Amino acid sequence: DDIHSSHERQMLRLRASVASSKVEEWLQVVRDGREAFYNEHESNRYQSRCAWCPPSMSTNKRDGLMQCLECSVVGCGPSSTSSDSSAHMMCHFIASGHNFGITCGPRAEIFCMKCGDFVYHEVFDQEKERMDISHY
């Protein structure tokens, strides 16, 4: 029985380590995205664009654009982010199996493909707030 419980503890530690690494990867995507947002905002030149839309169609969408937290590709978010959205990120999520994205504008909201809605988590909210404070 001790062998099983020792193995279970090792597996739990391994899973926790993997989860912690994944969260840190996602936080770095959030940090990089916020830096890009602030740089674009300060220069008044918006360079974030949907990977699928023609360049003339995807300018200035900001919170209508979403960045995948798994691979960093940027695309039009779900229709809830913009009424004229082509929802390219939804196609990306379905085709890739990725599940989370963050809007590219001032709101920086996390979207969950599995539940089809925006989700909130204290760690991400605190990091966004920390970045916002450091830029104002």
Image: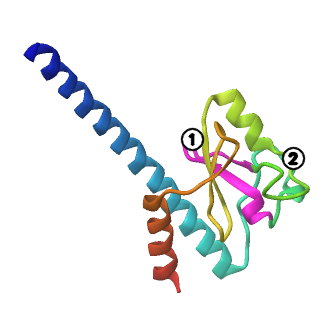
Give percent across and percent down for residue 39.
Answer: 60, 74
Compared across the picture, whether 37 is left or right of 46 comes to left
Residue that extends furthest to the front in the rendered view of this protein:
1
* Res 62 label: none
Compared across the picture, whether 61 is left or right of 13 comes to right
Cα–Cα gap, marks 2 and 1: 20 Å
Residue that extends furthest to the bottom in the rendered view of this protein:
136
Residue at 64%, 36% in the rendered image:
114
Q: Is residue 89 above or below residue 124?
A: above
Q: Nearer the viewer, residue 98 or 51?
A: 98
**Span shown in magenta:** 61-75
Amino acid on which the number 1 mark rests in the picture: Cys
Compared across the picture, whether 99 is left or right of 84 comes to left
Q: Quadrant of residue 91?
A: top right
Amino acid on which the number 2 mark rests in the picture: Ser
Q: Nearer the viewer, residue 5 or 65?
A: 5
Give percent across and percent down for residue 44.
Answer: 72, 79
Q: Is residue 74 above or below residue 123?
A: above
* Res 71 label: 1
Give percent across and percent down for residue 134.
Answer: 46, 81
Q: Quadrant of residue 58?
A: bottom right
Q: Which residue does the numbered mark 2 point to in the structure image?
A: 86
- Residue 64 drawn in magenta: yes
Tally the marks: 2
